[in-house]
Image (cartoon, grey):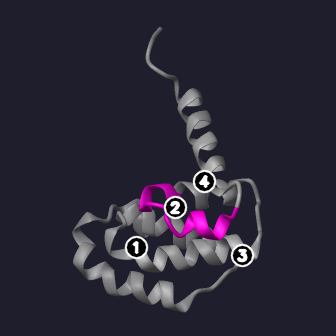
């Protein structure tokens, strides 16, 4: 059997993310790693999930892990919240504080 296709990989990630948030979203979100949190936020955005509790938990977790996040992860989290017209000044403030230390790691696409 050959290497997994992108579709198979996406299905696997989706299954893993569903398992994370199945029972109590707030609790499982509070334990997510930066990469997982970013993918979870993006998936919720793409599927038009607008549960305020989930998005608040995503923002809270992002605030905790901003220093560990990759620039692209910061961008995706902020983009996801903005698309849903949700504002979190504290999160944006923490991202702004972290930006100078990671400025060289941002790509032009992350800043757009």
Q: Which mark is residue 53?
A: 3
Q: Is residue 111 above or below residue 1?
A: below
User: At numbered mark 3, what does the secondary structure look like: helix, strand or loop?
Assistant: helix
Q: Residue at x 22, y 68 (%)?
A: 104
Q: Is residue 110 above or below residue 93?
A: above
Q: Residue at x 63, y 40 (%)?
A: 15
Proximity of marks 3 and 1: CB atoms separated by less than 8 Å: no
Image position, residue 58 (x, y; %): 58, 71
Q: Which residue is mark 4?
A: 20
Residue 112 within the magenta-colored segment of the rendering: no
Mark 2 / mark 3, whichever is N-terminal: 2
Q: Which image quadrant for residue 23? A: bottom right
Q: Which residue is mark 1?
A: 65
Q: Which residue is mark 2?
A: 37
Question: The magenta stretch spans which residues?
Answer: 24-38
User: At numbered mark 4, what does the secondary structure look like: helix, strand or loop?
Assistant: helix
């Amino acid at each position: 059997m050959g290497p997994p296709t992108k579709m198979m990989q996406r299905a696997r990630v989706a299954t893993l993310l569903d398992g994370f948030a199945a029972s109590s979203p707030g609790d499982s979100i509070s334990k997510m790693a930066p990469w997982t949190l970013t993918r979870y936020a993006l998936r919720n955005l793409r599927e038009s999930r607008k549960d305020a509790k989930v998005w608040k938990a995503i923002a809270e977790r992002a605030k905790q892990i901003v220093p560990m996040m990759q620039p692209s992860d910061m961008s995706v989290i902020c983009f996801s919240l903005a698309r849903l017209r949700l504002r979190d000044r504290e999160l944006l403030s923490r991202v702004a504080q972290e930006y100078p230390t990671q400025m060289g790691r941002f790509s032009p696409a992350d800043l757009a």
